[in-house]
Amino acid sequence: MTHDIAIVGGGIVGLATALALRERLPGARLVILEKEPRLGSHQTGHNSGVIHSGIYYKPGSHKAKLCVEGKNLLYQFVEKHGIRVERCGKVIVATSEAELPRLITLYERGIANGVPVELLEPARLRDFEPHAKALRAIHSPSTGIVDYGEVVDAMARELRAAGVAIETDARVTAITRTGDGLELAGRRLAVRARRLVNCAGLYSDHVARLAGARPDVRIVPFRGEYYMLRPDRRALVRGLIYPVPDPEFPFLGVHLTRTVHGDVEAGPNAVLAFAREGYRLGRVSPRELAGTLAYRGFWRMARRYWRTGTYEMYRSLSRAAFARALQRLVPELTSADLTRGGAGVRAQAVSPDG
């Protein structure tokens, strides 16, 4: 059978794409191909579980529009399916005079993007996060938390009920263009499709090249490591506490996040991963690492962020340094309050100019 559309990648992006296509093209034959035995095994299953409000993005940009719309659609989806979700809110705290102008910029962006926001003085901040410290802060009440693994499971159930084929253990190793579409092949895999949608996350550039495309970016993997707060110290955090992001660095900085399971995560940092699925420091793929190191875009990015990158590596190896970063948000925290948690790997798309 020839499918109308094959979606490569069974994370939340691939499944959400399938749901949208099913709604817009109800008669289309869809197949999702996931290389792992379980859906949502990588970025979907290794993150902070935050539903972002849309405050960070430039007004009028696609990111701003899609984040705000996506947040609303996600809340509708999880409520429809009875998935645990909490609109716990987030505070973004400015802890130095230098951060205050950037905080005001975020506040103005939130208003421009239609995101509910409140600018807080220290006394008002204590109403939301009594243990946080800041010169000023922003409260974002529409930010929430969810378990994205549960979201993926619900999406998969809905898709299967609608007749969408979902194949796991289906790694695509070759793509051949034919007269009327494409043939996707792998071990025990042979699929024909008229169109392909690439949702392969950490391997999206690889899949693009298999299909004959020449993407103008390459995926560089960055590991984000977490600590967990000891159970007796979780009361220091009611919801989410974030720093004002550094505009010179493409990540949001270490933060404190309560999960729907009752834990409090601290992190993540951002260090180069030596494998695209390198969740541990000792996990090294010589071929993938060589590909990263041979890419001129990586070295241009490294030159731009070398100072911050060096500190991130140091913080990765030092629990005391990690704790000092968190103390800017909640001064009462100490390194003794932290235990090692999990890690995720971000698929950072890097252009040749870094």
Image (tube, grey):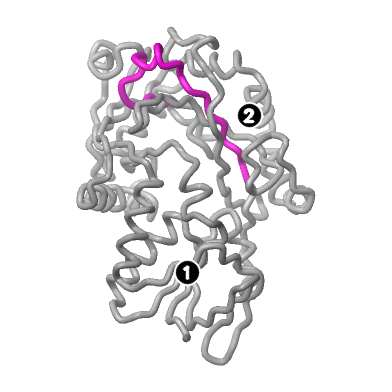
Taking depth in this image into account, of 256 and 95 the one nearest to the observer is: 256
Q: Which mark is residue 7?
A: 1
Magenta span contains residue 234: yes
Q: Residue at x 53, y 19 (%)?
A: 339
Residue 256 rendering spot, x and y as whole percentages: 42, 24
Between marks 1 and 2 in the image, the one whose residue lies nearer the viewer: 1
Q: Which mark is residue 262?
A: none
> Residue 129's quadrant in the figure?
top left
* Residue type pointed to by label 2: Thr
> Earlier along the polypeptide chain: callout 1 or callout 2?
1
Residue 346 rendering spot, x and y as whole percentages: 56, 44
Q: Separation of disc 1 and disc 2 at Cα?
A: 37 Å
Magenta span covers which residues? 221-242
Q: Residue at x 31, y 32 (%)?
A: 107
Q: Residue at x 36, y 47 (%)?
A: 150
Residue for badge 2: 308
